[in-house]
Amino acid sequence: MSEWPRLDYTADKPTIESLHLLLQLVGKLPLRLLPWTNHSWQVTLRMTPRGAITRSLPGGARQFSAELDFLDGTIRVACDSGSQSVLEVAGKPIAEVHSELSALLAALGLPAPLYGRPNEIPDAVRFVEDDRPRAWDPECARRVHRAFLLADRELVAFRSLYRGKSSPSHLFWGSFDLAVSRFSGRTAPPHPGGFPGLPDAVAREAYSHEVISAGFWPGNDACPQAAFYAYAYPTPEGLGGSAGLPGAAGWNGELGEFLLPYAAVRTAPEPSALVQEFLDATYAAAAERLAWPSDQVVAATPAFGRPPTAP
């Protein structure tokens, strides 16, 4: 049996949407409590054995974190005093979670800048007004969490092979994807923006420099299947016709990205090898067409306990 769990976006969509909106709510805390870091990296969450968590956040003279626990359907607020407060969120309307989380933070004497609405979602409803019922299938939430953890493992390994500027493997709660980005150091043409629910200024800052990104998402309406993806900005001419990709991978012209279906990874004899082949091949194709320095990949495989050896 594969260690990669079954995912089916069509069947899992109600719970995936609930997870996405809850992460949006948690993500408003670092957005408004941490100083802006290039490419919006201050807002991202990291995967944990139970869910996705903020980095340490300032609350006056105190520090705290907020974690969405996928496994038991809660938001956990941990303080530097050693205390932890747990809020049940599974199956609750977002407006109710918003009210209860705001009250919990206020009772702890912590800031609660949870106003506004979700980002990168068409026709998003303000948190305080979103009283629609929300689905929560515990088994689905566990499967989605497990898939993100395994994808994180692969992206962490891939990141370790690059000498240049790169992001950690981190979760963007706006688009609900796990991503690693590599940079050449050169500036890029101004991005046209146009993402729903995302200010153009944020998109332009995010893509201010040449980037080759790869990641994983559980699916969305534009791409209703879980997949690994890779793309470059700016997109070099001919990238979609690149050869040398794993057989299951291909170019999605509508998205302007390479996709490797999650289902192909799950059923592959060696899932990790397939993911790494996809990540390596798509990076090589984009880097060649963008004329990136050829000495930035420092190792063929991750190194443990010592610096990597050049390939």
Image (cartoon, rainbow, N blue to C red):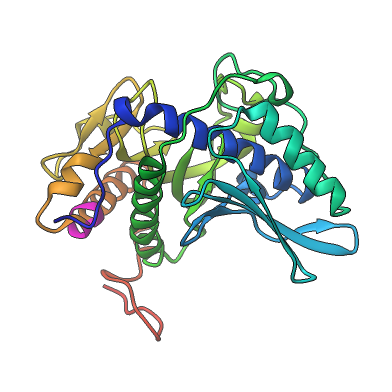
User: 145 or 285, which is in the foreground?
Assistant: 145
- Visible in this render: residue 238? yes
Looking at the image, residue 154 sits to the left or right of residue 132; the answer is left
Q: Which residue is most to the bottom?
A: 306
User: 194 or 93, which is in the foreground?
Assistant: 93
User: 69 or 159, which is in the foreground?
Assistant: 69
Numbered range of the magenta stretch: 272-276
The residue at the point 20 percent across, 31 percent down is 241
* Badge count: 0
Dominant SS type (magenta): helix
The spot of residue 298 in percent (x, y) is 35, 70
Query: Which quarter of the picture shows residue 131?
Result: top right
- Visible in this render: residue 215? no
The quadrant of the rendering that contains the N terminus is: bottom left
The quadrant of the rendering that contains the C terminus is: bottom left
The spot of residue 172 in percent (x, y) is 54, 42
The residue at the point 41 percent across, 43 percent down is 138
The residue at the point 34 percent across, 49 percent down is 147
Looking at the image, residue 301 lies above or below residue 159: below
User: 182 or 58, which is in the foreground?
Assistant: 58
**For residue 274: magenta?**
yes
The residue at the point 76 percent across, 33 percent down is 99
The spot of residue 56 in percent (x, y) is 71, 61
The spot of residue 223 in percent (x, y) is 33, 25
Looking at the image, residue 18 sits to the left or right of residue 138; the answer is right
Looking at the image, residue 98 sits to the left or right of residue 256; the answer is right
Looking at the image, residue 85 lies above or below residue 308: above
